[in-house]
Amino acid sequence: MEGGLVLLGGGNGGGGGSSGVSTTESAVLSKVEVVSEACSYPAETELELGLGLSLGGGGGGSTGKTKAANSSWGECGRILTAKDFPSVVSQRTNNGGPSSVTVSGTKRAAESVSHDSGSPTGVSQVVGWPPIRAYRMNSLVNQAKAQRGDEGDSGIGEKDKPKDALKKKLIYNGKQTSSATVNEKGYLGFVKVNMDGIPIGRKVDLNAHSSYESLAQALEDMFLRSANSLEKEPLTMASKLLDGSSEFVLTYEDKEGDWMLVGDVPWRMFVRSVRRLRIMRTSEANGLAPRFNESNDTQRSKPI
Amino acid sequence: MQKKTAYSFPDEVLEHVCSFIQSDKDRNSVSMVCKSWYEVERWCRRKVFVGNCYAISPRMVIRRFPEIRSIELKGKPHFADFNLVPDGWGGYVLPWIVEMAEAYPWLEEIRLKRMVVTDESLELVAKSFKNLEVLVLFSCEGFSTDGLAAIAGSCKNLRELDLRDSEVDDLSGHWLNHFPETYTSLVSLNISCLGSDEVSFSALECLVGRCPNLRSLLLNREVPLDKISNILRRAPQLVEFGTGIYAAELHPDVFSNLAGAFSSCKELRSLSGFWDAVPAYIPAIYSVCSGLTSLNLSYATIQNPDLTKLVSHCPSLQRLLVLDYIEDNGLEALASSCKGLQELRVFPSDPFGAEPNVSLTERGLVAVSLGCPKLQSVLYFCRQMSNAALVTIAQNRPNLTRFRLCIIDPKMADYQTLKPLDVGFGAIVEHCKDLRRLSLSGLLTDRVFEFIGRYAKKLEMLSLAFAGETDMGLHHVLSGCESLQKLEIMDCPFGDKALLENAAKLETMRSLWMSSCLVSLGACKTLGQKMPRLNVEVIDEKGPPDSRPESHPVAKLYIYRSVAGPRFDMPPFVWTMNEDSV
């Protein structure tokens, strides 16, 4: 078995110290030696002033280290490599040996992302990458929606589209899967959440959740835990938002501008139509949900 | 006694001389000459820029500079733009407004970037600063149209209201009605960020009509195409204009109306907006194209040949923002028609697509670098790059001051040689001696940082992602880049060693951001405890970092110098590593 980290391609062989350059067909996997160091690295108690750096370690001969590193990797981070970006690599050399240690940037934002969200597609799962502002992302999604003929925020809506838009539609049709992925699973899952009584809203990433329970839990953590001095009211959400036992209910505004109670439609349908969320006082939620009544001990079965 | 009068100016003279000194750096130098110069300077400073609102407290600013008329504050770290900073992190402006309301009643200008601004803050601004002329809220959030109504209603001297890229809660479009009928001083209005229902057209038209000095008007997306003509006709003196959505069914009347309206604006130099633009209406702007110096088409969906044709109509262009629909061919055309180009930004139209949807490669950028001798500032998203191209660009354009390259897929190697892009970026820093801002991407080893540390002596801001191999990389940067102010790093294998060895360097910088790197909790604590003038903040949404071993890497780390000590407004997911609190 090849030593530790995957050495790819010919030329550079076991390039001594730290900067082994991987020149290979795949060309994207790169050695990340220091990763193994971090886990076994003793905590520094003294500042080392001066330049006496000896970072030659971690090079070729770190077979054992890497293996060990791999097992403790559960706790440490991984550095992303090509494996996380299948789109990049035309031919990947899969030696079958221990893969280079990798960080899951995909899970960074919310470790609660359940695996049934699907495997990463391209770069869409990495928070912060590519470095495009949320505002611009929104526009891109709106454009994609418009070109696929969805209703919604684009404003072109019902009218006949000029020929060129049609042409664009053709281009996008070829990419339909990926655009759909952006909408359903892509980066753009952030919706605003406001809670009655709290002046500053928050944002939640819908893509980090695959069920109402998970979302409600996250919201409860967000608003219940924050001991922000700017809040004007104490939070008394002792119990869950979804089952009617709290003094607050979770509502959302859909694409048509209507306010609905969260939980009535299948999750995926909800994700596609939600524009923003509001944690509303129960007393104000009358007329929103026909099934809501004052009985506190009615446990509702949660929709899937 | 004779000596004294021979060598010292009366204060009034020094003050007069100072009034010509506008740059902060120079003012700071003046203040360090001697105590009496320090005193004179602080009483006559009118403008202050606080690059990090947590680096100093409002009281300290007020104590030193009692006569400020203009203040600029920045809050969240830059990576907040890309959703890396959780909501609720901080950057609240209210404490500043509260203090300044008392100390600076004559405040004229407030400029905020990446701060949380509540309606309460805006109402206080409206109440306290009767002379307010400029309010810029750049990438801010937390306020609604109610706050804007308060400003509109009270600030009689307001000249400039700029809300660019801010997130505003839409409650009512009628806030514009709060500008009294007698109000006519508007010079610049940027409401491009507002959503639907946030602007009443009639109020807007009225406002535009009665403000003869209006020079800059950037509308929001919801203003339909057919409303633009009315507005333009009321403001033919406009220099800068941003349309709303630039799409509609083609009606000859609407078109000729629009074209006529544009042609009546003889001073127009800058255009933007163009959301979802359709080619049919593009010719309506041809009459102003020859004079345009700035064009923002980054929300326009038009493609070639229409896009290239449009750009070729604008020979005076100095600044172009565009989607990658322009493709290499379009950029080559740009290079031959726009010889005065200084800034180019090319954004991706489909960043998440698995395959490229347009033919935009390094070729386009090389062409522009060759054809545009004044090119200084580049932001370029693409899917492939080569060392050869980067070297060529560097040699063609040694006058580059800002170079941000984003190769969309992380860790892409040189597509020709399959080598890392170290040498290419090395050439950039070596040739472009005045480079102030650099963003790297692609496959990069420690070597590129060696080059950066050696050559990038004027570099002030560096952004890294998925780069480097060992701590040496970070060490090269921290020890070599003399002018470094801001360093932001995501997903790089940099850990404790380089950070601790260069701890002193951090006090000479504004801030350091590291997320998904390998800095251990222990190192953060060490740094926080040993460096009292640094605020070392660990951001972790999963729970107290103490619940994990000290060798465990922290999720996100934000270090910044501060004379104000650890902040008081940290949310539950931010932990300070400074001594008192640990």
Image: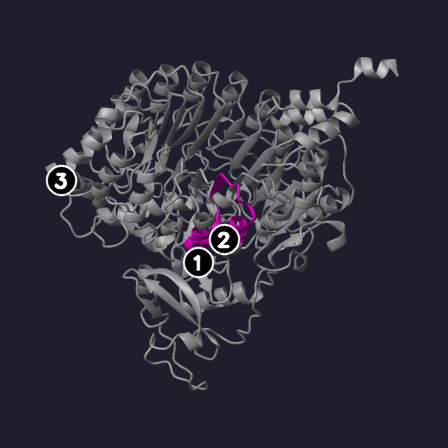
Q: Which residue, given by chain and number where applicable, does mark 3 sit on?
A: B250
**Residue at coordinates 76% horizontally, 30% vertically from top-left?**
A50
Q: Label 3's element?
A: loop
The part of the image, by quadrant, that contains residue B214 is top left
**Residue at coordinates 75% horizontally, 20% vertically from top-left?**
B10
Q: Label 2's element?
A: loop
- Whether residue A246 is visible, yes or no, is yes
Residue type at numbered disc 1: Ala
Q: Which residue, given by chain and number where applicable, does mark 2 sit on?
A: A109
Residue nearer the viewer, A211 or B411: A211
Residue type at numbered disc 2: Ala
Q: Which residue, given by chain and number where applicable, does mark 1 sit on?
A: A208
Q: Give the x, y percent position of residue A254.
A: 31, 62
Work out whether mark 2 precedes mark 1 in sequence or the reverse, and give the earlier one.
2
Residue type at numbered disc 3: Leu
Q: Chain of mark 2?
A: A
Q: Chain of mark 3?
A: B
